Image (cartoon, rainbow, N blue to C red):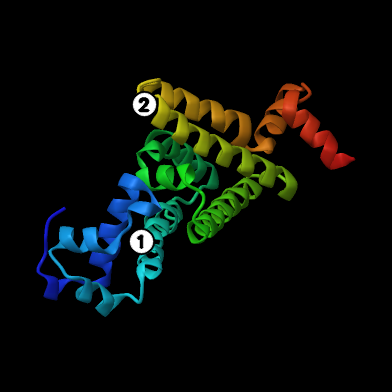
């Protein structure tokens, strides 16, 4: 971490340094004195910006939530088609999710209540966004919610597995897996029914069961 002149430090500088510490060692690693030393600052400089350590952790979590959720959603909203949004999101999530060392550290140490509350909020927002896109593709609210939760399961599981066994799969396998997830959980129900109508066949499998449940 590059030292900066203490007089020029901003709250964001402290929050970024805290986020780096969190990624290395979890919430317990966010300690004022080591971060101040890394920044070339004093504890007095810290208290100029923050009331206590807890407020620094909150600022670090704000940065994490912004970069890993708010900014991602904002970028996806630039894609007009919800199907393509989800295809991009799934592919990126499988490939780059395991690089989020902050989330891996938070998942590994769920005992800090403010961080746990933040993780729950982020999870709810991500699942809600996924469900909204799935509904736009034709899934019912209940179907969309179920699929969104399953995608969240897969995202977290992939992240933890990649952390435990980092060379288990390569980039090509990631792309195949993303397509499997898309085909199994995301592809719009109307796609299969439209194809079935054109061919005169009946839809089969999970979407056929889904269609029957909607009619019930």
Name the residue nearer the viewer: 91 or 36.
36
Q: Which residue is mark 2?
A: 166
Q: Is label 1 in a helix, a strand or a loop?
A: helix
Name the residue nearer the viewer: 27 or 61.
27
Residues at marks 2 and 1, CA–CA distance in whole angstroms: 26 Å
> Can see residue 117?
yes
Locate residue 199: give its quadrant: top right
> Can see residue 138?
no
The number of numbered badges drawn on the structure is 2
- Name of the residue lying farthest toward the right: 216
The residue under the point 42% across, 42% down is: 104
- Point out which mark residue 103 bears: none
Q: Position of residue 64 (x, y in %)?
A: 38, 56
Name the residue nearer the viewer: 178 or 16.
16
The residue under the point 16% across, 61% down is: 37
Locate residue 194: give its quadrant: top right
Name the residue nearer the viewer: 81 or 67.
67
The residue under the point 36% across, 61% down is: 60
Q: Position of residue 177 (x, y in %)?
A: 49, 25
Q: Which residue is mark 1?
A: 60
For the C terminus, the quadrant is top right
């Amino acid at each position: 971490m590059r030292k900066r002149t203490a007089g020029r430090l901003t709250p964001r500088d402290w929050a970024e340094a805290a986020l780096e510490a969190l990624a290395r060692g979890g919430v317990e690693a966010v300690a004022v004195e080591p971060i101040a030393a890394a920044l070339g600052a004093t504890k007095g400089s810290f208290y100029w910006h923050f009331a206590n350590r807890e407020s620094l952790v909150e600022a670090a979590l704000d940065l994490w939530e912004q970069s890993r959720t708010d900014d991602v959603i904002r970028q996806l909203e630039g894609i007009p088609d919800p199907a393509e949004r989800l295809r991009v999101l799934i592919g990126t999530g499988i490939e780059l999710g395991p690089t989020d060392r902050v989330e891996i550290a938070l998942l590994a140490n769920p005992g800090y209540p403010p961080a746990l509350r933040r993780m729950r909020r982020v999870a709810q927002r991500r699942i809600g966004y996924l469900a909204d896109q799935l509904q736009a593709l034709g899934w019912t609210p209940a179907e969309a919610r179920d699929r969104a939760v399953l995608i969240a399961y897969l995202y977290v599981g992939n992240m933890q597995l990649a952390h435990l066994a980092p060379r288990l799969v390569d980039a090509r396998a990631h792309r195949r897996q993303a397509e499997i997830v898309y085909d199994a959980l995301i592809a719009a129900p109307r796609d299969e029914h439209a194809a079935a109508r054109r061919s005169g066949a009946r839809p089969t499998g999970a979407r056929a069961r889904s269609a029957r449940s909607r009619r019930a």
